[in-house]
Structure formats: C-alpha cells, structure tokens
C-alpha cells in the first residue's frame, strides 16, 4: 500500500469541511493538514485547528522562504499548505488537504504520482446556497462573493480525478473512503 495526497476541493458550503472531519475521525492512516491563512478567524475557529491564522507580513516571509507547498489568494486573503508538514507526514501516512481547485492542480503538478484530486459537488445550486447561508458564517456581501466563485470551481471538475456528489453525507463519505482505498492499493 502506498501513501497518497488526497485533495478535496469544491465550492464553499458544499460540505468539504464536514466530510474531511468525518474521514479523519474514521481513518488513523490519514493525517489532516492545517493550512495557514491571513483571514480573520470565524467565531468558534481556533488557531492551529481550522487554520494557523497569521499576518500578511508573516505569510509573505514564508512564501519567500519556500515554506508553502502551494498557496493562493481568495477573497483578498492568502491561504497556503505547509510544505514540511505534508512531506513529513507522507513518509508514514496519507494526507488530506481541503483546498481550492487552483491549489489542488498545483499540488498535482508538484506531486503527480501520489496526488488524488476529488471534487465535491452539491446536488443542486439551491441546496448549495441553503447550506452556505445556513452555516451563518458570512455576511451578505461575502456570501454573494462566494456564490460567484462557485461556477468557476465547478467548471474545473473535468481536470479532477473524481467527482463526488455530496447529497447524503454518509453515502458521499463512503464513496470517498472507497476512492482512497483503491488509490492506496494502486501499483505505480
Ligand atoms: P465547506 O467546508 O465546503 O465550506 P461545510 O462543511 O462548512 O462546507 O458545510 C456547509 C454546511 O452544509 C454546514 O452547515 C454542514 O453541516 C452542511 N452540510 C454538509 N454536508 C451536508 C449534506 N450532505 N446534507 C446536508 N447538509 C450538509
Ligand atoms: P474559507 O475561508 O471558507 O475557510 O476557505 C476559502 C477557500 O480557501 C476554500 O475554497 C478553501 O478550500 C481554500 N483553502 C483553504 N486552505 C487552502 C490552502 O492551503 N491552499 C489553497 N490553495 N486554498 C485553500
């Protein structure tokens, strides 16, 4: 069995975070990576758990030091995957990244053999809007900005290895677990 870098992408509100938490809780062989971001923490988020919340100044210093495997800017904030953590973990486990499509495609370019790209899509646009609004983490303006980006994210689906519809949470989780199992068993 080999270790793989599993990337979960998809539009904001589709359920990536919820699925990632379930996958990590059920699989000791899977390590979650905590990204760095310059955005402010949302209520309930803790430094080092959802993200490492750092200043833009520190983020730029770390870009210069080549500390990020990949990074990207969304909604005026930077987000990046810590390189050393991922490289260290991959020696003993598979690693799960919950990042956007640009980041996912960059990861695949950097580590083509071991990266598995999974796009999570909503059963419908109405349902996506309902989930995003229901989460209640964004103001009206930020919510609209996120909805505008949805089309872009979904249009990249053909570049991904797998597309999983998050209709029923348990079903979607099992589908992703099957994909990971199959990919780990592949002989490259
Ligand atoms: P993301 O990380 O993709 O932005 P979240 O995991 O925060 O999305 O999920 C957004 C909201 O949708 C949350 O309130 C979550 O509980 C809900 N949700 C996630 N998956 C489902 C599902 N399959 N059915 C119904 N609600 C869901
Ligand atoms: P949010 O602000 O909702 O937590 O995340 C906004 C977007 O940033 C999401 O699409 C999320 O997947 C993406 N994201 C989170 N961490 C990273 C990262 O390390 N790299 C990249 N490229 N995107 C990230």
Image: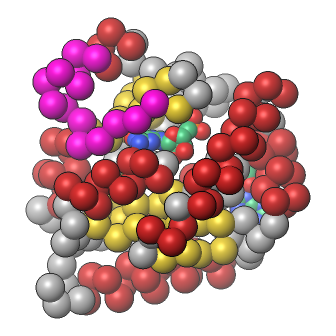
13 over 168 or under it: above or below: above
53 over 180 or under it: above or below: above
**Which color scheme did the rendering employ for the protein?**
secondary structure
User: Along the horizontal axis of the image, is 152 left or right of 23?
Assistant: right
Residue 161, given in percent of the width and then of the height, sits at 42, 75
Which stretch is magenta? 60-73
User: Along the horizontal axis of the image, is 88 left or right of 106?
Assistant: left
Which residue is at 53% across, 61% downward? 156
Which residue is at 67% across, 26% downward? 43
How many marks the image carries: the answer is 0
Quarter in which the N terminus is drawn: bottom left
The answer to whether residue 22 is magenta is: no
Residue 15, given in percent of the width and then of the height, sits at 65, 57
170 or 128, nearer to the observer = 128
Which residue is at 29% across, 54% downward? 107
User: Along the horizontal axis of the image, is 177 left or right of 84?
Assistant: right
Quarter residue 142 falls in: top right
User: Along the horizontal axis of the image, is 24 left or right of 147?
Assistant: left
């Amino acid at each position: 069995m080999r270790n793989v870098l599993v990337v979960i992408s998809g539009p904001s509100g589709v359920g990536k975070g919820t699925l990632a938490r379930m996958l990590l809780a059920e699989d000791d062989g899977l390590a979650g990576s905590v990204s760095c971001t310059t955005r402010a923490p949302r209520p309930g988020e803790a430094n080092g758990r959802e993200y490492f919340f750092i200043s833009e100044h520190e983020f730029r210093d770390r870009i210069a030091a080549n500390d990020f495997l990949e990074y990207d800017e969304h909604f005026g904030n930077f987000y990046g995957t810590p390189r050393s953590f991922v490289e260290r973990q991959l020696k003993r486990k598979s690693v799960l990244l919950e990042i956007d499509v640009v980041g996912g495609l960059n990861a695949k370019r950097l580590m083509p053999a071991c990266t598995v790209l999974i796009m999570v899509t909503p059963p419908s646009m109405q349902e996506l809007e309902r989930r995003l609004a229901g989460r209640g983490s964004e103001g009206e303006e930020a919510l609209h900005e996120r909805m505008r980006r949805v089309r872009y994210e979904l249009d990249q689906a053909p570049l991904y290895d797998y597309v999983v519809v998050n209709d029923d949470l348990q079903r979607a989780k099992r589908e992703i677990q099957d994909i990971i199992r199959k990919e780990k068993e592949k002989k490259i």
